[in-house]
Structures are given as structure tokens and as C-alpha cells.
Image (tube, rainbow, N blue to C red):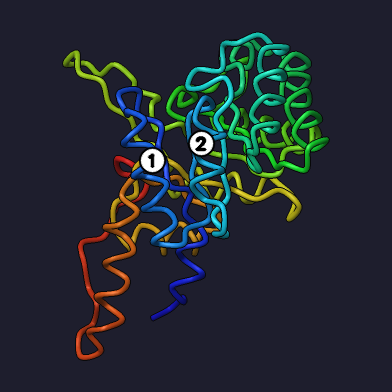
């Protein structure tokens, strides 16, 4: 195998964010994260304190989302939500930028919004991942092309103190011509672009529905250090099966990054 189990498992932030998830499902998700020894759970803010209790004695971190999923909360609300999450024991924060402000070219607002969350989190020893929601940025904005817009966001987030830049929430659904809603999530193009647009101090996180091992490996090969995933057990069970089956090539259906995302 190209990477060890630990190297890949410790890339995964096990996503427990669907709006219909009950407390029992969140608890089961934390237990699964501990079983597979992933990097973290990415969980709803109200459940942070309980997740910390459930994961005590493991090295799985607890992360919370802030301003999720659309980034529309005022800056002070995001800062206070961060404070509460960190007080409850969150070690990582996944915040969403104010997308409308960014598309309107109000860069100072965007930077201060991110900085307020980073400053608060860092006071508590927590790290911050800043979500762009790239599915909403395909046409660019503020007079910039899509790629230049994302580069600008990378520069702003690094200056504001972000520890990661992140592609998506997993909930950035865009209405299609036939009236249905869908999203790409992370793409090969965007992961390369974001990695090239930040210094080595800032890491890159992919999100958007990787559902097999090849997708996770490709994310790592593209320079991302974390992946938000809900298909954790399927991905890591696939690793164990390949490792056990030394007589096979371990081939599986590959994701087509950049052609519908993950």
C-alpha cells in the first residue's frame, strides 16, 4: 500500500453534520470515529461537550462548525459561537466565510470576519479551517475570474491566521437547469489551486463526498492534509481489505476529480 492506515485515517474528519441527525446518531458517529481512529469528528456545536466526553481517552479530536453552512451570521455571532465551542472542548473550528460579502468584493469585511474567529480560537489553543464553498464561486466575482477569486481568498485567509483553507461544506447545492440541486465539492483543479495559493504554513482540506479509498489517496497526493467525509467506514474498510488481500491489485472504481467532484 502506498500509505499506512494511520497516515490515511488521520486525514479524515468524520462528518456528523446532517440536519436530521439525532443525538443517538451523533453518539454512534463518535463511537465509529474512535473505532477507526480518525483525525477528528466534525460535529454540530451543541454536541461538542458530549462528544468530548465520548472521545475522552482516544486521540480523536473534536471539531465544531461555525456559521454553518452558509456563513451568514454576523462576525460577533461567529466569534461567540467559536468561544462557546472552544470552552466546551473543541480543538478545531470549521468556519464558513460570508460568501455574499466576498462576491461583492468587500474584502476587508471578509478578512476581519475570518480573523475574529481565528483570534478567538487561537486564544483557546484551537485551530481554524476556513470554508470557501467553491460551488458558489464558479463564475468568480468582484471583477475576478473564478481562479483569481479563490487565490484572493487564500491570501486573505492566510493573512487572517487560518490554519487550513477548505473547499466546501458538503451542503453548497446549486440549482441545475432541470430544477434539481447538486454540488461538486472538492475538485482536482481546486485542490491544486488552493495548495499553490498558500504557503506551507496553511494546510488544505477537501470536502464534498469522497466515498472510496482511491479518492482519499488522490486528495493526499494533491497536497491536502484533511478530508471531510461521512463514508469513513467504507473508505477505511476498503483499506483493510486491500491490505489483507496481498494477492490482489486492490483496484477499485476511481473518483473522477474535476468531473462532478467526489
Q: Which sits in the foreground, 94 or 87? A: 87
Residue 65 in percent (x, y) is at 55, 30
Residue 100 in percent (x, y) is at 57, 11
Secondary structure beneath dot 1 equals helix
Distance between the Cα atoms at labels 2 and 1? 8 Å
At a point 46% along the width and 65% down the height, the residue shown is 8
Q: Which sits in the foreground, 152 or 233? A: 233
At a point 47% along the width and 54% down the height, the residue shown is 12
* Left or right, 201 with reference to 25: right
Q: Mark 2 points at which residue?
A: 50
* Left or right, 245 with reference to 204: left
Residue 44 in percent (x, y) is at 48, 29
Q: Name the residue under label 1.
A: 27
Q: Please, is residue 15 above or below residue 85 in the view?
A: below
Residue 230 in percent (x, y) is at 34, 44
Q: Which of marks 2 and 1 is nearer the N terminus?
A: 1
At a point 20% along the width and 62% down the height, the residue shown is 253
* Left or right, 34 with reference to 209: right
Q: Please, is residue 95 above or below residue 3 in the view?
A: above
At a point 29% along the width and 16% down the height, the residue shown is 175
Q: Please, is residue 73 above or below residue 128 in the view?
A: above
> Does residue 128 appear anywhere in the picture?
yes
In the drawing, what numbered circle is on residue 240? none
Q: Please, is residue 191 above or below residue 105 in the view?
A: below
Amino acid at each position: 500500500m502506498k500509505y499506512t492506515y494511520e497516515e490515511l485515517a488521520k486525514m479524515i474528519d468524520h462528518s456528523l453534520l446532517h440536519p436530521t441527525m439525532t443525538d443517538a446518531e451523533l453518539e454512534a458517529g463518535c463511537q465509529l470515529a474512535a473505532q477507526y481512529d480518525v483525525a477528528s469528528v466534525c460535529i454540530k456545536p451543541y454536541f461538542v461537550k458530549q462528544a468530548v466526553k465520548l472521545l475522552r481517552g482516544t486521540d480523536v479530536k473534536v471539531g465544531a462548525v461555525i456559521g454553518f453552512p452558509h456563513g451568514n451570521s454576523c462576525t460577533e455571532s461567529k466569534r461567540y459561537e467559536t468561544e462557546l465551542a472552544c470552552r466546551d472542548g473543541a480543538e478545531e473550528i470549521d468556519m464558513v466565510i460570508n460568501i455574499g460579502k466576498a462576491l461583492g468584493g468587500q474584502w476587508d469585511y471578509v478578512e476581519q470576519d475570518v480573523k475574529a474567529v481565528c483570534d478567538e480560537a487561537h486564544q483557546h489553543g484551537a485551530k481554524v479551517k476556513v470554508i470557501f464553498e467553491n460551488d458558489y464561486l464558479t463564475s468568480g466575482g468582484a471583477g475576478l475570474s473564478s481562479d483569481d477569486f479563490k487565490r484572493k481568498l487564500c491570501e486573505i485567509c492566510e493573512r487572517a491566521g487560518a490554519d487550513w483553507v477548505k473547499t466546501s461544506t458538503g451542503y453548497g447545492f446549486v440549482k441545475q437547469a432541470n430544477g434539481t440541486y447538486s454540488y461538486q465539492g472538492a475538485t482536482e483543479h481546486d485542490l491544486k489551486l488552493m495548495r499553490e495559493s498558500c504557503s506551507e504554513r496553511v494546510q488544505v482540506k477537501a470536502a464534498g463526498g469522497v466515498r472510496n479509498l482511491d479518492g482519499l489517496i488522490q486528495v493526499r497526493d494533491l497536497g491536502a492534509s484533511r478530508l471531510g467525509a461521512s463514508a469513513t467506514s467504507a473508505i477505511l474498510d476498503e483499506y483493510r481489505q486491500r491490505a489483507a488481500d496481498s494477492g490482489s491489485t486492490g483496484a477499485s472504481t476511481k473518483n473522477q476529480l474535476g468531473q462532478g467532484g467526489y
